[in-house]
Every structure is written in C-alpha cells, then in structure tokens.
Image (cartoon, rainbow, N blue to C red):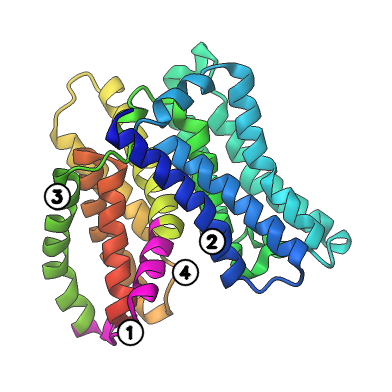
Amino acid sequence: MQKKKIFSWIFLFGLSIASPLIVMYLTDQNSLVQKISLGISMVFITITILFLLLPDINSGFLELLKQKSIYYLFVVSILLIPLINWFFISDFSSRLKEILGSYILWYIIPALIMIAPTFHIKLKPWSPLFHIVGVLILAIGFDNRSTEPIIDGFIDLSYSFNALWVSGLCLAIITIQYDEYSEYFNWNIDLKKVGFPIGILFLFAIIVLPIGLLSGFIVWNPNWEGVGVFLITFLGIWFTIALPEEVIARGIIQHQMLKAAKENISKYKKGYNVVIIILASFIFGISHWNNTSGEFIWIYIGLATVAGIGFGVCWEKYGLFSSMLMHTLIDFTWVMCFTG
C-alpha cells in the first residue's frame, strides 16, 4: 500500500474519531441522546466528505457510485440525515408545515433538479443548467438561513451541521456526473497547490487591506488565544465555510458555466474564462449581501467579488484544495486579526 494511501486512511479514521469528540465538547444539547445523535450524524457526513475528496480512497468509491442503486441510496441517505434531529424539536408538531416546507423547497427540490441528468442521456447536454439552477436554490436557502427550521433540534451547532450536510449532498450528487471530478475535487496535496493560493493571497491583501481599513469596514483587532484555538478555528473555517462555498461557487457554478461555454460557443477563446470567472465571482459576492450592516453592504460585496476572482483562479489552476486553502487563509486571518 502506498504511503499516500496509508496517510489518507489514517486521516479519515482520525477525523471520524475526532469529530464526534469535538461535537460532544462544543455542543450544549439538552440530553446525552441528543449529543450522541448529533455526533453520529456529524461522523456520517464527515466520512462521506472524506471518502469523496481524499486521494487514493475516492477512486474506488466513485466506481461504486456508478451503480444506479448504490448512487441513489447514497444520495437519499444524505438527504434523510436531518430527520434524526426532528425528534429533538420541542414544538415539532405545531411547526410541521414550516419545517417540511423548508425541507422540500430548499433541499428536496434542488437535489432532484441536480440529480436529474445523472443517468439520463437526453438531459446530459443540459446538465450545467440543471446543476446551476439546483445549487442556486440550495445556496439561497442555506445563505439566507431559510433552512434553520429544518435543523432546530441541533440548534447549538446548526450552522456547522448544515454546512457539512450541504457540502456532502452537493459532492454526492455531482461525483459521477463530472468526468473531471477526480482531477478537480481531489485533495491530492503538493507544493504548487499550496504555494499558488498563498501567492494570490498576497496580491489580494495588497488590493483589499487598504480599501477595507480606510473605509472602516476592517478594523485591526488581534484575537490570539493559543494553538488550540488556532487549530479549531482553521479546521472550522476549512470545513464549514470554505468547503460548502467553494463546492457551490467554484465547483458547480463557475465550473459548469465554463463547461457550458466551451461546449456551446463555436469560437471559444481563453478570454471567455476571465469573463466567466468574474461573473461567477460577482454571484459569490452578491451572496454576502446579508452578512454585514447596511453601510458596508457594497464594500463587502465588492471585496468578496475580488476574493472570489482569486478563488476562481485557484480553482481553474489547481482545483478545490487550492481554492479552499486561499478561502480559509483569508477568513482565518480576518477572524484572528481583524473585525469587520
């Protein structure tokens, strides 16, 4: 067995053991049963994500998913995970319509839209449209927190749970629909995949920091509380912010826009790449409209768009790992060094 493969399995088992322990420590659920249920759910989602992204593991797993029965069973099992936490929603019966309505609108419908082209040859030419429309519905519900009623039973860690769930669901659906999935979504680490986003990050800082500081949107306020906080914060951003946002914005929206352009524009030129990356980045920027106060909305959207261009270039060059790394480093620096 190759060293990389051994490392992948150790990493998978290590995180699958660590995630429930972290959940047990961080969460303040009402009962032990509730904590255990949340822990088991998080383990299942974490293992799912790692199976789909870790090198030397995902190749075999992707082959299994090419079987219709296994693919559908796998996607449905992820879709059903939130039902576990419904047992812990105290006023569930009185809120049934709200919870079920949110679940169907923001998860079932977009999932069905994205799944549709999987094994249907006639729909294949339209798969980029299906994926973009489906994931936009999913992202709107997630970003506007319209999905919170669905996970009220795990309210203490509802955002983290939802972020991982959305990531796992998107990845599971698109795995066998993308011929280039292994190339772009593989966390196969090398120096180029690490060095490139760090270089782009410095260029981003030169542009963004002066604007942010002079406008008052960003304020220097270091918050360094030890190695443990550094590690938990970094991993938290990596899995619950960078992962879902990069899978949605770059892995699906940008990637499928580029794919559609290349397949449908007869005289496609490389310059179109730039236009599409900017457009996808603007969509990403607009999604941050509700993340700050009214006076800074357009500054935030502008800076998020610029950051999105950096993430988009990282994605096109080296895939998900590089775009996630740049995204995580920016958010980590913000959390640890600034307030905004």
Report which residue position mark 4 lands on: 290
Q: Can residue 179 be seen in this view?
A: yes
Q: Looking at the picture, which amino acid does disc 4 mark?
A: Asn
Circle 1: element type: loop
- Residue 159 pos. (x, y %): 56, 63
Q: Tell me the kind of residue under disc 3.
A: Phe
Q: Which of marks 3 and 4 is in front?
A: 3
Q: Quadrant of the C terminus?
A: bottom left
Q: Do the residues labelled 3 and 4 touch (CB within 8 Å)?
A: no
Residue placed at 43% from the left, 63% from the top?
236
Q: Is residue 20 above or below residue 292?
A: above
Q: Do labels 3 and 2 touch, CB within 8 Å? A: no
63 lies above or below 251: above
Kind of residue at disc 1: Asn
Residue holding disc 1 = 223
Nearest the viewer among 45 and 180 is 45
Numbered range of the magenta stretch: 214-238
Mark 4–mark 2 distance (CA, rounded to whole Å): 18 Å
Q: Nearer the viewer, residue 147 or 300?
A: 147
Decide if residue 104 is on the left or right side of residue 138. Answer: right
Disc 1 to disc 2, C-alpha distance:
21 Å
**Classed neighbour count for the residue bearing mark 3: other residues with Cα under 10 Å, few (<14), some (14–19), many (≥20):** some
Identify residue for label 2: 160
Label 1, label 3: how far apart the Cα atoms are = 27 Å
Q: Residue at position x 75%, y 66% from top?
A: 32
Q: In this view, does 329 lie to the left or right of 175?
A: left
Q: Which of marks 4 and 2 is nearer the N terminus?
A: 2
Residue drawn where x is 52% and y is 32% of the image:
173
Q: In this view, does 195 lie above or below 31?
A: above
Residue at numbered disc 3: 196
Secondary structure at badge 4 equals loop
Structural distance between the alpha carbons of marks 1 and 4: 24 Å
